[in-house]
Image (cartoon, grey):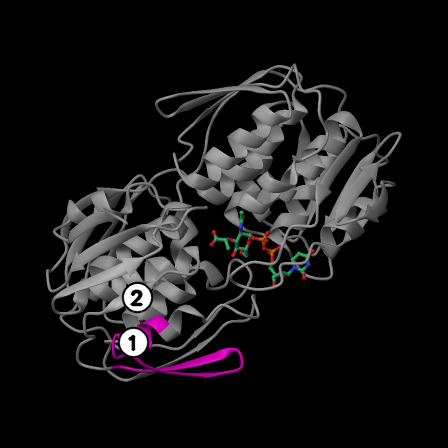
Amino acid sequence: MKLCGSYIITGGNRLEGESYVSGSKNASLPILAATVLNNGITKLYNVPNIHDTKVMIEILRNLGCKVKRVRDKIVVDARGIKKHEIPEELMRKMRSSVILAGALIGRLKKATFSCPGGCDIGARPIDLHLKAFENLGINISKNTGYIHCTCDTIIGEKIHLDFPSVGATENAMLASVLGKGTTVISNAAMEPEIVDLQNFLNKMGAKITGAGTNEITIQGVQKLKDIGYQVMPDRIEAGTLLCAVATTGGNITLKKVNPEHLTPVLEKLKECGCKIQEEKETVILEAPKKLKAVDIKTMPYPGFPTDMQAILVSILCTAKGTSIVTENIFENRYKYTNELKRMGAKITIEGRTAIVKGVRKLTKGVVEAADLRGGAALVLASLTANGKTKVKNIEYILRGYENLDEKLNSLGAKITKEVE
Ligand code: EPZ
């Protein structure tokens, strides 16, 4: 990924008005991978047009699928799939492409991929994915950095995950859809994106129950059928837009959102002093002049989402009081705090805990994004800093947010893009 883009953000404006949420990145990626399971044509709607979905589409094409995007509709024709190997350079572009392994094994009974590198938020091992595959009778061999998975048939089995890993849960589901017999995943992840994947697969003719609970049952079927499916809204983008307005003391009517997916975030924003109204597909937020400090512990869903940790920390930097934030999911998800400290934030990191002492105002500066959510945190911090802040390496942010600058500008922010 070439890193040469920057946002120039003039802080100090109150954000107010109406905006909307795009489709979920973290639901789109496993659902795009799952189209490989159908020897036919699948139509997807509301897939965000972002770096990560573009990479996933590039990989599907590389495997032999025909993929075309017509505005917000993506059509995947997986009849011509002929390769089972995910090229290393594409794996490197996006580590979550490991989710294709389960779908490739499910369809072709084999998959080869390179060990996904660690990334900007931790080692990101895939031991739980591989253990789940072995439970299903898949042979796994490793050499020169490549992992080869093969099997004659997938035999449904009991799979217990040591940790409710989102990716491992999704991969075990995908590998089992066309298997023989029944797979039961216990200690499964319960994220809404897993429910969206179940709904998508069942619409194609799979027989899956339990997504959203910690036990998911997949009854193998012979064949899937051509369907169209609308991907769920992005709950992390929704949380990001709400926090952007909250930190500027503004108000927002946020549309095309599922409030139920946001409960842990909305509860924290209420604790910070925001008034929140929830309707069917809308959240209305009115922020106080100054937010109050709150304590946060990230947990697997339905706990507070780790993907919102950086974003909350950034708005707590100018809250009244001291906040204690504990990151329980990833071991290295505080790198962005060094950049916030360059803007005058008072943050002390002790192991997995960040102690955030609220200051009156952050100061403008030049900061660098080093990961997706940390980058978004720097954008939100710049909204309240006086003067112009330059956020570099915005390619990290463009991985997961569709038109973030345009959405914030439509609420009254002043963000321009600059390419070196
Ligand atoms: C998904 O990543 C999301 N990505 C992440 O969002 C999100 O932060 C994460 O789930 C947790 O909610 C996508 O859905 C594409 P995990 P995933 O497997 O599946 C450890 C974003 O910003 N682990 O639930 O990779 C792992 O190291 C991204 O949108 C193992 O030890 O997350 C981590 O500490 C970032 N072994 C923890 O579990 C394994 O085999 C949670 O990982 C797998 C995971």
Residue 84 position within the rendered picture, expressed as x and y whole percent measured from the top left: 73, 29
Which residue corresponds to the image point at 17% horizontal and 80% vertical from the top-left? 360
Which residue corresponds to the image point at 19% horizontal and 70% vertical from the top-left? 364
Q: Is residue 298 left or right of residue 177?
A: left
- Asked if the stretch drawn in magenta spans residue 329, the answer is no
Q: Which residue is mark 1?
A: 342
Q: Which residue is mark 2?
A: 367
Q: Which mark is residue 99?
A: none
Q: Secondary structure at mark 2?
A: strand
Q: Is residue 266 visible?
A: no
Depth check: give the residue in front, 117 or 219. 117
Q: Is residue 402 left or right of residue 217?
A: left
- Asked if the stretch drawn in magenta spans residue 351, the answer is yes
Task: Look at label 1 and name its amino acid.
Answer: Arg
Mark-to-mark CA distance, 1 and 2 = 7 Å
- Which stretch appears magenta? 339-358
Task: Look at label 2 and name its amino acid.
Answer: Val
Which residue corresponds to the image point at 38% horizontal and 34% vertical from the top-left? 49
Q: Is residue 119 left or right of residue 155?
A: left
Within 8 Å of ligand 1, the CB of disc 1? Answer: no
Q: Are marks 1 and 2 in contact (CB under 8 Å)?
A: yes
Q: Quadrant of ligand 1?
A: bottom right
